[in-house]
Amino acid sequence: MKRYIGTKIIDAEPREKNYGPQEQQGQPGYTVVYPDGYTSWSPAAAFEEAYRECDAMTFGLALEALKKGLKVRRSGWNGAGLWLTLQVPDANSKMTLPYIYMSYPLDAKNTPGARVPWLASQTDMLAEDWAIVD
């Protein structure tokens, strides 16, 4: 068999199981809602091994979120409102590869709507305080 690793961004909340085999009734777990709306229940141990909260992600998970079209940031960054986005080339672009950009909010006093290419530092790559920006 081949080995697989997965990355999903889901919504979940702790809950006790109220269905399934009798021996699992009342055990701690999570109700999981997937992006397509499918809802399931996962035992706590399996869930906690597979998922971590989106405000305590590794750099690798933040990159996966960028690839899914989401914005990310580090909670430890000094500038309020900074976030990263991934620019992917389209049919009309002269770009050949995706680029990561840091964006500043349009209402910022000192940087009205700035967008600059961004490179990760070693500290950024090893940090576990990455979060998805809503």
Image: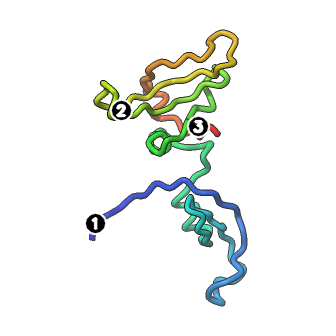
Q: Nearer the viewer, residue 48 or 40?
A: 40
**What residue does disc 2 label?**
89
**Figure coloring:** rainbow
What x and y, as percent, mark residue 50?
A: 51, 60
Which residue type does callout 3 highlight? Answer: Asp
Q: Earlier in the sequence, mark 1 or mark 3?
A: 1
Give the distance between the C-alpha atoms of the residues marked 1 and 2, in whole angstroms: 32 Å
Q: Secondary structure at mark 1?
A: loop
**What residue does disc 3 label?**
129
What x and y, as percent, mark residue 48?
A: 58, 61
The residue lying at 52 percent from left, 30 percent from top is 84
Res. 133 image quadrant: top right
Q: On the rendered structure, is 70 left or right of 19?
A: left
Give the distance between the C-alpha atoms of the residues marked 2 and 3, in whole angstroms: 28 Å
Q: On the rendered structure, is 50 left or right of 106?
A: left
Res. 81 image quadrant: top right
Q: Which mark is residue 2?
A: 1
Which residue type does callout 1 highlight? Answer: Lys
Which residue type does callout 2 highlight? Answer: Pro
Res. 56 image quadrant: top right
What x and y, as percent, mark residue 32?
A: 62, 65
Q: Earlier in the sequence, mark 2 or mark 3?
A: 2
Q: Nearer the viewer, residue 96 or 41?
A: 96
Give the distance between the C-alpha atoms of the residues marked 1 and 3, in whole angstroms: 31 Å
